[in-house]
Amino acid sequence: MAADWLGSQVSINCGPTLGMYQGEVSSVDQTSQTISLRQPFHNGVRCPVPEVTFSAMDIKELKFLDIQTQSGGCRASAGHGVLSDPGVKSSGQSGQNSRGGYPANNTHSTTAPITILRKGPPASSSNRGPNQATPKKNGVKNGGGGGGGQMRLRDDECFGADMDEGMDTDFDFEANLALFDKAAVFSQIDGTDCNGARSRGTPGGERGTPTRYRHDENILEVKPVVYRQITVPQHGGKEYCTDSGLVVPSVSYELHKCLLASAERHGLSLERRLEMTGVCASQMALTLLGGPNRLTPKNNHQRPTVALLCGPHVQGAQGISCGRHLANHEVEVILFLPNFVKIQESVTNELALYSKTSGKQVASIKDLPVSPVDLVINCLDSHENGVLRDQAWYLAAADWANQNRAPVLSIDPPVSGQKQAVEAKWTLSLGLPLPLDGGEARVYLCDIGVPKQVFQEVGINYHSPFGCKFVIPLHST
């Protein structure tokens, strides 16, 4: 009898869409081919309703896990889409069983969704509750024929039940939250146990305990930073420091000349130094002119203008090299270089390259712009020839630069004690700084490519302060 199933623990497979259900059989209706489970579980999670009802056509497989019978003679069995007495043979065989159940190969069992009904008061098969589906007779509802009646039946069974009536039990948020042990989880994240003790390795702690670090702790052990990494055989009279605190001492002009001479013997010729100085100085000038905010293809109508004041010496050749690179970057360059009777060969070579660019060259102060330019680059001074500072062209160029309201960048300015006629806002030293006058100009240092062993050859213990840059600012100490 159907009552023999009551109290048994069953597992119902409703296919991949509806999933698996487990629970205790509370009622079996062979007339309507439905089975109800008490305290059901859906895919291992307890259902929010106390009871659910399934139609046989939605059941793919039914397994009895624990059969409770009065006679004790029943055994566990499995069914596919039908409900029958325990004594009837397995419904997995084709055809209808002796109770009129539907065969396992019923085509509706693979397409119809599951019907979940709220359990009403106890009633016989002839007096069903209001939420149970209308019994299906020979696959036809209300005497209708054809596939239309079957489709209407499936629609009623799927959508006809009032699901809101079954949700009569509120979800217990507090009980669900109690299943999550927040203290244990956060203690693992913080590296502490539940009692608040640190689990990271500490001095005097147990050996073998894995060390845990905070997000702001350094994993790698580092040596303390040595800020004085450059030492010179003779003090130049002034010291600077970088943004990271590294000390950069100044050197005398005589030691600086020995350093450049030693580098030239090892292959770092004057032409290479001029090119490195021109690249670094032009990069600094481009930054001072606005960088990517000023030099863009969409801003060709506002190209910056640079006035370049050069003399007939190595410092002047460095300035011409810088002007060539600026002109290659679409900067309007105006080069001032008087018509000297005698100039150095390096200046002649740089002029030949500069003439291939769009830059202009003038020999008179009258040809320089009257209105302010964006930047003035001063390369008038020489470290060795101080006589030029008394000549008329030099005084006129210095007076024009001071009256033009543009900021001034001086490349490789003279050392302290020598007169600087042009007031500069920035100065750029090469390799190592010279002891410059303590004016308001900000000092910058550029890397001209001198190898470390060349520094050691002249008695300088050198460690590069540049890091990832070729031009860095220096601050007076």
Image: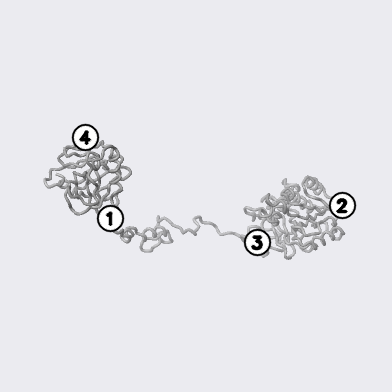
- Whichever of callouts 4 and 3 sits on the residue coming sooner in the sequence is 4
Disc number for residue 93: 4
Contact check, label 3 and label 1, Cβ < 8 Å: no
Residue 374 at what x, y percent from top left?
74, 57
Figure coloring: one colour
Name the residue at the top extreme: 94
> Of the residues tagged 1 and 4, which is closer to the observer?
1
Q: Amino acid at mark 1?
A: Glu
Distance from Cα at disc 2 to Cα at disc 3: 40 Å
Helix, strand or loop for disc 1:
helix
Contact check, label 4 and label 3, Cβ < 8 Å: no
Near mark 3 (Cα within 10 A), the count class, few <14, some 14-19 or many ≥20, is: some
Q: Quadrant of the N terminus?
A: top left
Q: Quadrant of the C terminus?
A: bottom right
Helix, strand or loop for disc 4:
loop
Helix, strand or loop for disc 3:
strand
> Of the residues tagged 4 and 2, which is closer to the observer?
4
Q: Amino acid at mark 2?
A: Phe
Distance from Cα at disc 1 to Cα at disc 4: 38 Å
